[in-house]
Image (tube, rainbow, N blue to C red):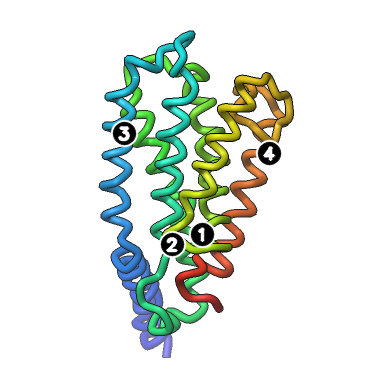
Amino acid sequence: MTATSAARRPRLALPTARLARLHAAGRGIPGGLAMLVLCAIGLRIVLPWATPGSDGARPLPLLFEALTASVVGIVFRSPFGEVERVTGRWLPVLRFAAVPALTAAAFGALAAGSAGARLDLGYAGLARDLIGMVGLSLATATVIGGLLCWLGPVAFWLVSLYAIGSNWTTPWVWTGRLPSDTGAWLCAVAVFVVGTVLVATFGARDGVHE
């Protein structure tokens, strides 16, 4: 009996690992990672026009943060429809686990793309702004669909440009605050948490909804 139980234990983890691989492949995560690399390359190309104190110091890096956040959101679209229900209760777990992994990959790509350069708000500002924009992308994917998830980050990018130029002080436009601003961090993290919970629970609108 004990030997039988022991023999069964390794098998319990196998479906989960297999589902994780299938989930990543089905969502096009490898392609999404390739897009993150392209975003990093694009950021590297525009950095000469985004040095601190220049006109592009905030708009250009923020644009690539918005694009990177959009890449994270779009991979939560399901191309399989009802067939994906075979994953059962694992589907929300897989989506939930994918969010921090993809967000970390997005940050790593942008950090690598800006290595050796001076970002206006440094890597702390990059992390905060990206986290918030990823949350917006995920929330937009849940509400109107993965293919349109870029609307949230890009709209916020436009609002940010106006807010920065008009010296807004609201922490809800965290991109206009210093990295040391606790309120801005709290707002960005709150949006990220909401977006994560929404997409993990419901998935992208053009995907599968439990």
Q: Secondary structure at mark 3?
A: helix
Q: Mark 4 highlights which residue?
A: 187
Q: Mark 3 highlights which residue?
A: 40
Going from N to C along the chain, the mark reached first, 3 or 1, is: 3
Q: Residues within 10 Å of mark 1 (few under 14, many from 20)?
A: many
Q: Amino acid at mark 4?
A: Cys
Q: Are marks 2 and 3 in contact (CB under 8 Å)?
A: no
User: For the residues marked 1 and 4, what is the alpha-carbon distance in whole angstroms?
Assistant: 19 Å
Q: Amino acid at mark 1?
A: Ala
Q: Mark 1 highlights which residue?
A: 141
Q: Are marks 1 and 2 in contact (CB under 8 Å)?
A: yes
* Residue 145: percent from left, percent from top: 49, 63
* Residue 132: percent from left, percent from top: 57, 41
Give the image quarter of residue 155: top right
Q: Mark 2 highlights which residue?
A: 76
Q: Residues within 10 Å of mark 4 (few under 14, many from 20)?
A: some
Q: Horizontal placement of 198 versus 208: left or right? A: right
User: For the residues marked 3 and 1, what is the alpha-carbon distance in whole angstroms?
Assistant: 23 Å
